[in-house]
Amino acid sequence: MNLPSFIWLWQIAAWSMGCSLLAYVMLAVTGGWLFNRRTLKRSRPRWLRPLHYSIGIVLVTFVLVLLAIGLVGTLGYYGSLGHSPHLIVGLLVVTLVLISATSATQIGRRPWARSLHLAANGLLFLGFIAVTFTGWTVVQKYLP
């Protein structure tokens, strides 16, 4: 099959991944600030929680864009999925991001949600490391 070059798709994926990692770091910083203020029983800036939520929404958006690009690009290039461990690791990262986002909306109402949110984000750190390394091997297959 004579397909067009998918390099533009991988460029969008690379930028989305970089922005996802940046958003994750920013969430860790703002989340740490929220945690610090909470444990010290000090007031926090009124803008901090909305900023944390907004960055979280951005992360969810970028991760879903990455999922779509990965599926479309792989199907377009190979005609099927499952050519590397990157698919499984990527789906794990998407799942962890969605668990984290969903649990974040429940923190005020359900006491267990904060623990789930923090646990998902801790595992997400490992997931991002794994998806970065497996993604690098995938990118090498597509480069001329």
Image (cartoon, rainbow, N blue to C red):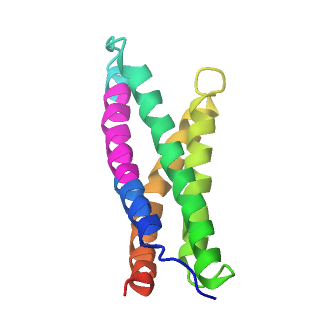
The part of the chain drawn in magenta is: 19-35
* On screen, residue 25 above or below 6: above
Prevailing secondary structure of the magenta residues: helix
In the rendered view, does 44 fall on the left or right side of 54? left
The residue nearer to you, when weighing 68 against 40, is 68
**Left or right of 52 on screen, residue 93:** right
Residue at image position (41%, 29%) is 52
Residue 135, compared with residue 37, is above or below; it is below
Residue 114, x across and y down, in percent? 55, 34
Residue 88 vs 48, above or below: the answer is below
Determine the residue positioned at 65% across, 81% down.
Answer: 82
Instruction: Give how far across and how far down residue 141 sits, in percent.
Output: 44, 86
Q: In the image, is residue 29 part of the stretch drawn in magenta?
A: yes
Figure quadrant of the N terminus: bottom right
Asked whether, in this view, residue 28 is left or right of residue 83, the answer is: left
Q: Is residue 70 left or right of residue 46?
A: right
Residue 90 image position (x, y, % from top left): 55, 65
Q: What residue is shown at x 52% (from left), y 77% (from top)?
A: 4
28 vs 66, nearest the viewer: 66
Residue 108 located within the stretch drawn in magenta: no
Residue in the foreground of this view, choosing between 14 and 102: 14
Residue 99 appears in which quarter of the rendering? top right
Q: Quadrant of residue 15?
A: bottom left
In the picture, the quarter occupied by the C terminus is bottom left
Residue at point 57% right, 71% down?
73
Q: Which residue lies furthest to the right in this view?
A: 80
Count up the numbered dots: 0
